[in-house]
Amino acid sequence: MSKTLTNRKDDYAQWYNDIVLKGGLADYSAVKGCMVIKPHGYALWENMRDELDKRFKETGHQNAYFPLFIPKSFLSKEAAHVEGFAKECAVVTHYRLKNDPNGGGVIVDPEAKLEEELIVRPTSETIIWNTYKDWIQSYRDLPLLINQWANVVRWEMRTRLFLRTTEFLWQEGHTAHATKEEAVEETKKMLEVYATFAEEFMAMPVIRGVKTANERFAGAEDTYCIEALMQDGKALQAGTSHFLGQNFAKAFEVTFQDKNNKQEYVWATSWGVSTRLVGALVMAHSDDEGLVLPPKLAPLQVVIVPIFNKDPEAQAKINSIANELISTLKSQNIRVKFDNDDNTRPGWKFAEYELKGVPVRIALGARDIANNIAEVARRDTKEKASVSLDNLAAHVVQLLTDIQNNMFQRALQFRADNTTEVNSWDEFVKVLEEKPGFISAHWDGTTETEEKIKELTKATIRCIPLNNKQEEGKCVLTGKASKERVLFARAY
């Protein structure tokens, strides 16, 4: 396969696919709408998972696992929830195959029909709250703070690798609380966990906000979200945290005896992020040469490429310096590789590691070593520098921090440059067409206006930012009174 990538400005969608496929993140699968996550892509997800899992446990949560299959009747117990997911559900109707008597391989055994169909997990609220009914009896059992790492299936008609696939990997937290206040606090706390992870590890600035009633999770009273801006000016919902009220507790009869011996329904939250974050990482930072990965998440942070000649003594010297550097970097938990494979030329290696987004590349050649230097290249800016071997390890450690910070600041500046306040409908349409990004505009608060704007422009209200400035204004479409601006954008 040619490693030449489509230019971002020529065809952003094809550029994204090129990055994912040629950068070794994922591949198409024999199952329509599903993907194969390749080792480089899965290593990225593992690093995300490990860091998030640590943060969940630091905030008191424990991991558990619930069944992949959900009885169909469970989804009927919470009306808004079933309506929200009904069109995306994969349904298991039979439990056995048999040989085709006509010699056509195997067929579904009509005698093996399930008494009740099973839904392949699109999300786990129903199966989990049916379980919580047995786990929660008293206020002493609360709060119950559970997370699970799992796969889910949502039958998508139009799919795109990582961003929207029929099956994807994610985590879903499901918590139960004695009071509304505790549940709301949990919902906001987990949103902040996601936001700080996105900004500190993914180097991806996000807007913290709340969804409109029209955009809420099915069955939630409030949905909080983090919204990120991609390089094509489209928004991407990078994580959600839902305050579920008592809806699922009432649907599944989950009550507890409070301190006054009174039976009360518990209060609930759920929250999740998925492998969509890998797609976000690609679109937020990468360039026309390939992936650009923030050091904190990069599976490989530093690669050392030797420039060998035919002098065995020079080769031995390069190997010695490389091994000493590796030892020093690994002692500081830096993921480093010495690529001394002599089947490929250094130039090919340089291009390959650039494509895969390795943050720092070090070239060690006999001439450089004779001058006590090494060539150090950083992936984010493509700048190269000659660095003294005496200071090489310390330089690399600092450079990784600098790259992480630079990537965040660059993405933050991009968002600032592509967030526009508008005050009229003509201005709204003009900016949307000529300068894609976030549009900050007044909205009259009605679902009718929200849906009309979406119908006319394909732009949606991404969120109402938290701690939003209150100001008098007029809705850009209807001219009706408004007390705050909301963020619009076209989105993935």
Image: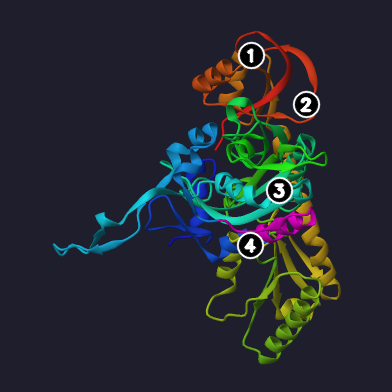
Residue under label 2: 468
Distance (Cα) linking label 1 and label 4: 44 Å
Labels 1 and 4: the sequence-earlier one:
4
Residue under label 4: 46
What is the basis of the colouring in this image?
rainbow
Residue at screen point 43% across, 37% down: 87
Distance (Cα) linking label 3 and label 1: 51 Å
Pinpoint residue 259: horizontal percent, then vertical percent.
82, 42
Residues packed near mark 2 inside 10 Å, few (<14), some (14 to 19) or many (20 plus): few
Labels 4 and 2: the sequence-earlier one:
4
Query: Toward the viewer: 60 or 95?
Result: 95
Labels 1 and 2: the sequence-earlier one:
2
Residue 476: mark in rendering: 1
Residue 137: mark in rendering: 3
The amino acid at mark 4 is Glu
Eye-nearest disc, 1 or 2: 2
Pinpoint residue 184: horizontal percent, then vertical percent.
75, 36
Distance (Cα) linking label 1 and label 2: 18 Å
The amino acid at mark 2 is Asn
